[in-house]
Image (cartoon, grey):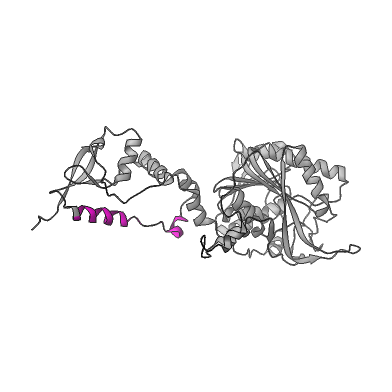
Amino acid sequence: MQQQLQWKTENRKVDTLLPHKKSPRKISKEQMEILKRSLEAFNLVEIPAIDLDGTILAGHQRIKVLQALGRGGEAIDVRVPNRKLTDEEAEGYLIGSNAIHADWDLDLLKNFDVSLLIDLGFDQKVLDDIWNKKLAKDTFDVEEELKKIKEPTTKFGDIILLGSNKLICGDSLRPETLQKLFGEERASMIISDPIYNISVDYNGGIGGKQQYGGTVNDNKPDAEYKEFLKKSMEAALAVTKGDAHVFYWSDQTYIWLIQTLYRDLGITNKRVAIWLKNSQNPTPGVAFNKCYEPCTYGVRGKPYIVKGVNNLNEVMNPEMTTGNNLLQEALDHIDIWATKRLAGNQYEHSTMKPPEVYEKAIRRCTKMNEIILDSFSGSGSTLIAGEKLKRRVYAVEIEPVFCDLTIRRYEALTGTKARIVRGNETL
């Protein structure tokens, strides 16, 4: 009859401990990095268990990381039994102690700040599993909220802090505006939705029935419009990494202009993505109705791009998948973005888009916690999409009323109050 096992804590030198030849526990590079950072921050909290001869029963990865950190000569606490375990006992403990290391509860991980998870070394794929789900339809009523804003509280020059996002009320054509917003930080992606130069009255909104006090001129000569876009791109690129994705929305008639400016500014043209809407815009005197909006896409340098399905045929390959999210992932990688559009009279900003239309570009071209620049924020759809997908959006909007609208939209989504930096004061 074997003596009942009892355990006590002793001191042993790390390098004297021996890995069990049947240890089933393996660790990825990403997990190794998380454990390394944890040990550096908190030291050894969960102590290893060993057999009488120094063979490790639990804690193989902790010992491995301690050695990688140059701490092999250190004496640490270990749990030691009162007798040597039989082979069956040792193997049973090996399996049992590793089996309790379950997968992450992804819903509970959402309660932690994404920057903390990144600092701890969490793999991008794990973070994607937590937050990169398809965005739910946005239900914020822009029209009703705009009616409530009688006198904007935002002042020109204010920086509005919306969680990890920032919005400045200013002119995005001025480099100093972007420098004030970014400081030493830099964006990984630009996605901007400037005026389309199609003679829309911004003061009245799409329906022409409101009075917002907008001052934007949407009827410029082509040369003036080109200079307008060029200045916005130059200011944006100055606060963007050398390797970056660039997206600019426009009317169909100005795709050529965006592509020309891209070439002039060192941006390589890649695609024209299409937002395919569920409605059409009849135009008197034009043979065909407008049912899409183009977004011209280019890159500077060699920016990050998420790995995934590159061939739609893979979706139908039974050796690769039983379905799951592979079809959606494949559709995320093509340049047609099919998202429902509201009725025209519900669009109070002339180029307003639902947050869902931004999600493919954001998921495909950025990592969690990276910065996206939107130089023409409007109603704040990019910022809302970024918040949901745990990217940081730094945005510029020249009209105080739409800054107020974005504040309301963010607070309704998150329940977190905005903070306004005005001069040296935070309101």
The magenta stretch is 88-111
Q: Residue furthest left?
A: 1
As rendered, which of 91 and 123 lies closer to the eye? 91
Q: Residue at x 67, y 56 (%)?
A: 405
Instruction: Examine the residues drawn in magenta and state their main secondary structure.
Output: helix
- Residue 290 placement (x, y as % from top left): 81, 62
- Residue 318 placement (x, y as % from top left): 53, 64
Q: Residue furthest right?
A: 285
| Left or right: 211 in relation to 238 | right
The quarter of the displayed image where residue 338 is located: bottom right
Q: Residue at x 78, y 41 (%)?
A: 261
Q: Residue at x 49, y 56 (%)?
A: 130
Residue 274 visible within the image: yes
Assess whether residue 97 is covered by the magenta stretch: yes
- Residue 232 placement (x, y as % from top left): 75, 42
As rendered, which of 320 and 2 lies closer to the eye? 320
Residue 43 visible within the image: no
- Residue 182 placement (x, y as % from top left): 62, 39
Picture layout, residue 54 above or below residue 112: above
